[in-house]
Image (spheres, rainbow, N blue to C red):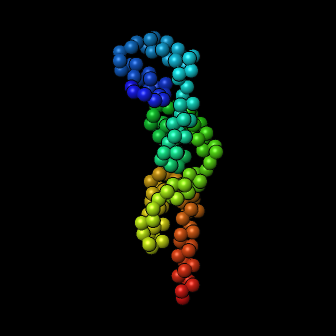
Amino acid sequence: MGRGDRSTDQVKSFLSGRGYSEAEIRATLRTLKRLGYLDDEAVAVRLAQARLARRPVGADALIETLKARAFSNETANRAGRKAYEATTEQAVAARFLSSLPVRFTDPRREARRRAALLTARRFPQDVIEILLAPLLFDQDHRHADSE
């Protein structure tokens, strides 16, 4: 299975794939939990926080990523909320935008590019509009001033 944190379901699937019986798997899972090696909630929170630091995404995308890693809906939802406890989607999206180079001199085109990138990372539309409004407002203001 390799190194790193794993969910209970991932460990169960791994052991099952190696031919262990259900009774052996249950006993192993109980032992791992008792020893503190298997804690889905803690693992999911660590993965969520690492994911936000490495590849900023919206809360919904973060939760879906956790579910894809075989965490239950409840665990994924709690971990997603905990990962966002100390921040907001707007702050995460703003940090992501600040890391991007400007590709287009036309502010409207650049705003569309940035909106597409935020949409692809599943940030909410209202967050995207708040963050990109200054780009569009500055362009509208310059256009009105030149008339």
Please, is residue 99 above or below residue 26 in the view?
A: below
Q: Is residue 41 above or below residue 33?
A: below
Q: Residue furthest left?
A: 18
Q: Residue at x 41, y 23 (%)?
A: 13
Above or below residue 54? Residue 145 is: below
Q: Given the current orientation, which residue lies at the most extreme right position? A: 86
Residue 67 location, x and y as percent? 48, 36
Q: Residue at x 54, y 46 (%)?
A: 59
Q: Quadrant of the N terminus?
A: top left
Task: Indicate the position of residue 82 as horizontal and vertical percent values.
Answer: 61, 39
**Is the C terminus in the top left, top right, bottom left or bottom right quadrant?**
bottom right
Q: Is residue 60 visible?
A: no
Number of dots carrying numbers? 0
* Residue 28 shows in the view: yes
Is 3 on the left-hand or right-hand side of 77? Answer: left
Of residues 23 and 18, the one nearer the viewer is: 18
Q: For this rendering, which residue is in front, 74 or 147?
A: 147
Q: Position of residue 116 (x, y in %)?
A: 44, 60
Tell me which residue sits at (47%, 47%) in the image. 55
Q: Nearer the viewer, residue 111 or 55?
A: 55
Q: Is residue 86 left or right of residue 93?
A: right
Left or right of 107? Residue 89 is right
Q: Quadrant of residue 24?
A: top left
Residue 50 x, y percent position in the rendering? 51, 40
